[in-house]
Amino acid sequence: MALTHLIYLHGFRSSPASAKARRMAAWAAGQPGLTFACPQLPPSPLDAMALIGELVAGWPAVGAAVIGSSLGGFYATALAEQPAHRKWRAAVLNPAVDPARDLAGHIGELSAWHDPALKFDFTAQHVAELAALTPPPRLTTPLRYYALIAKGDELLDWREMLARYAGCDGEVLEGSDHGLTDFEDHLPGVLEHLQG
C-alpha cells in the first residue's frame, strides 16, 4: 500500500517545532507526492479534533495514516477509530491513555515547551472535552497501530500504554524518555508500519 497522506499530531504543550515533528516533516518532504500536515493544535481538545477533521476531510479511506505523540497519540487513536478512518494506519509514540485524568491537575495558565512566551489557559472544560473524546477501550483493528512505548517515560506509565495497545505492532524500549530523544533509532520501524 502506497502512503499518500500523513498527518502528525504533537503532544500537550508541544508544537510542530518539536524534534519528532520536524523529523517527520523532513522525511515527508523527501517523499514525492505525499500530502503531509502537522498543525499547531489549539488547547481545546474539541477545537483540536475539529481542526484535524478539517485537515483530513477528503483524504482517502486507504493510503492515509496518522502519527501522534503523547496527547497527540490519544488524538490519533480517536481519529483512527472514527468509521471513515478505520482502514488508516496509525503510529502512537508514548501515547496518552487517559489524558482527562492525567491533565486534571494542570488547569491554569501554561506555556508552550518550544516557546515559553506562548501562553494559553487550560481549563476544566478542556478536561471534560478530553473525557468526552475518549475512544472505546477496545481498538477495532489493533494491527493497524504501531505503538512505540518507552519504559523510561517519566510522565506516563508504560504498562498502561502497553495494556491499551495490546495486540498492536510496535516496540517497547527498555529506557528512553517521554520525548523519545532516540526517536531516530526507531523511525525505520514506524515508517515501515505506516507504509504498510
Image (cartoon, rainbow, N blue to C red):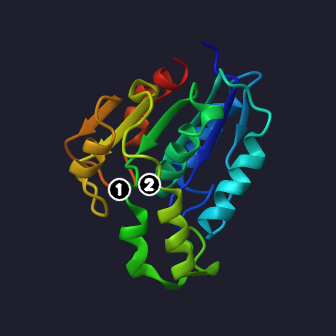
Q: Nearer the viewer, mark 2 or mark 1?
A: 2
Residue 158 on image: x %, y %: 25, 50
Q: Check contact, mark 2 vs mark 1: CB within 8 A.
A: yes
The residue positioned farthest toward the bottom in the image shown: 108
Q: Position of residue 41 (x, y in %)?
A: 65, 60
What residue sits 43% from the left and 80% below the top?
A: 106
How far separated are the C-alphas under marks 2 and 1?
A: 8 Å
Residue 70, disc? 2
Front position in the image: 158 or 133: 133
Tell me: 194 left or right of 189: right
Horizontally, is 54 left or right of 142 in the view?
A: right
Residue 187, compared with residue 133, is above or below; it is above
Residue 194 shows in the view? yes
Q: Sequence-wise, which precedes: disc 2 or disc 1?
A: 2
**Mark 1 highlights which residue?**
178
Task: Look at the numbered disc 2 and give the secondary structure of its residue.
Answer: loop
